[in-house]
Image (tube, rainbow, N blue to C red):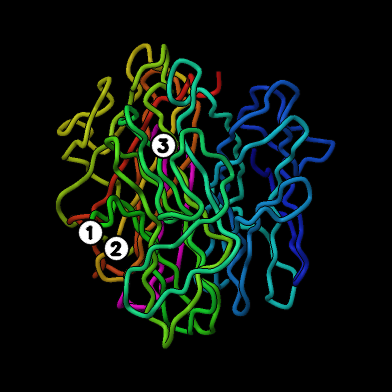
Amino acid sequence: MTMASQQSIPTTTFTALSFDTEDWDEGGYHEGVTNPSRLTVPSGKDGKHLIIFSGGCNHATVGRVNMRLYKNGSHHGAEVTYDSRTSYANQIIVALDLVAGDYIEVFAYQTSGSNQNTYHGGTLKPWLQIIKIDAASGEGSLVGASCTKTGSTSIPKLAWTAIGFDSEEFDTDTIHDNVTNNSRLTVPTGEGGQYLIFGMGHLDDLDAEKGAIFGLWKNGATLLARGNSTAHWAATNGTAPLARIVTLSAGDYIELMCYQDTTATQNAYNWCWIGMIKIDGAGPDNDDVGASATYGSDENYDGTNFLEQQLDTEDWDNGGYHDTVTNNERMTVPSGKAGKHLVMSTVGISNGAPDRRVELKLEKNGTTELAHMAMTWSQDANPPFFHLLRVEDMSEADYVLMASKANDASEDTRGTLEYAPRLQIQNVEGISE
């Protein structure tokens, strides 16, 4: 679901975002006239659902923006918060256990002192997706967990610290324990394979000009994904979404960690989330179909134009989606593999000096923007890292690519370690049934 035009958000008033345009609706989740803000679980569609939101408000000279996920009219613990002078759009990524009649909304809140419009340039405009995932792991089954927290985790200055989770939205296979090693999601015996891992970080009271880094770590040693948040001219909360498709073995565990450089210890609060979903059997005929590729060198921005990211190294390619030489910036749907696809991109900026604007977007067939994130960075010590996640209905020969830009020609994409640009695609046509 998306918006055909801007929506005005009053200052200091939580306002439901109204979605009047359907990209697709399989099952009857949305009614564009009656309660257009809601995605409602239809009769017979009880189960686990992946929720993805992207959007933001126009740039303002003061204040902050909150985008909150609501379930049945109440805040359900997931949100993004950012300084309205630094960010233009951000994402929420969670998985929820829902029953027929449950409905999901996103509420916007801003403190600029006057009305502000939702951003509507390209796909910086808000959109919301809900995808039933009960068959993601093949043969009509799901292996996965989604967790949040009821209290806080103390995060010391300048030290990666694991965030504990004491509340389970769902856990299909004893992946998580609310007490023992409660920061961990562990792959069960016999369930190694491809997983979508995701997290939502939320740190209280960042000092002005300071930042927080959130990371998804494997086995306490390997950083798989990272996302940054920064306070600009005034203190604010720091939030960041993270996601990646990874290959995990039985016994591997995932944690959400935080690193911050404010003047004192801060708290990670109960708006943090972590989740993992096995997606080996989400493709047609329970197949594992998809690709992941990266680029091993820095690429220079020209300060004006979007750079279509080259991808010369494949993590994997199951089905023939990618070529490392010809049109290597593309992931192209092979013959016989049309349908819903999970698309994920990430990029890191090499320098990220203060007051520079950076953007990341996903494009389909070189003309249609699927997702878009933008930020004006305020700190040079921790340069920015972006993640974009979306489910897209794709036909044979459709392709996706990622593009990014910075408004200064001295900036580069990062081509090393966990910073490297990465584009991933996974066929999830069989994810729901």
Query: What's the residue type where badge 1 is placed?
Result: Arg
Along the line of sight, the residue nearer the viewer: 405 or 69: 69
Which quadrant of the structure image shows residue 265? Answer: bottom left
Query: What's the residue type where badge 3 is placed?
Result: Val
**Considering the numbered disc 2 on the image, is that residue within a helix, a strand or a loop?**
loop
Task: Estimate the x, y position of residue 250 in percent, counting from the top left.
Answer: 29, 35
Is the residue under label 1 in contact with that under label 2 (CB below 8 Å)?
Answer: yes
Q: CA distance from mark 1 to mark 3?
A: 20 Å
Q: Residue at x 41, y 37 (%)?
A: 343
Task: Estimate the x, y position of residue 32 in percent, counting from the top left.
Answer: 77, 35
Disc 3 designates what residue? 343
On the picture, is 229 further left or further right than 77?
left
On the picture, is 56 further left or further right than 207?
right
Count of numbered badges drawn on the protein: 3
Which quadrant of the structure image shows residue 42? Answer: top right
Along the line of sight, the residue nearer the viewer: 181 or 54: 181
Q: In terms of sequence position, does the residue under pointer 2 or pointer 3 come before the other?
A: 3
Q: Which circle marks residue 349 in the picture?
A: 2
Crowd class of label 1 (few under 14; some 14 to 19; many from 20; radius 10 Å): many
Looking at the picture, does residue 264 appear above or below residue 353?
Answer: below
On the picture, is 18 further left or further right than 123?
right
Task: Estimate the x, y position of residue 300 in percent, counting from the top left.
Answer: 21, 60
First to last magenta residue range: 353-382
Type of secondary structure dominating the magenta stretch = strand
Crowd class of label 2 (few under 14; some 14 to 19; many from 20; radius 10 Å): many
Q: Is residue 122 visible?
A: no
Task: Estimate the x, y position of residue 190 in percent, counting from the top left.
Answer: 32, 27
**Considering the numbered disc 3 on the image, is that residue within a helix, a strand or a loop?**
strand
Disc 1 designates what residue? 414
On the picture, is 122 further left or further right than 363?
right
**Residue 381: in magenta span:** yes
**Residue 70: in magenta span:** no
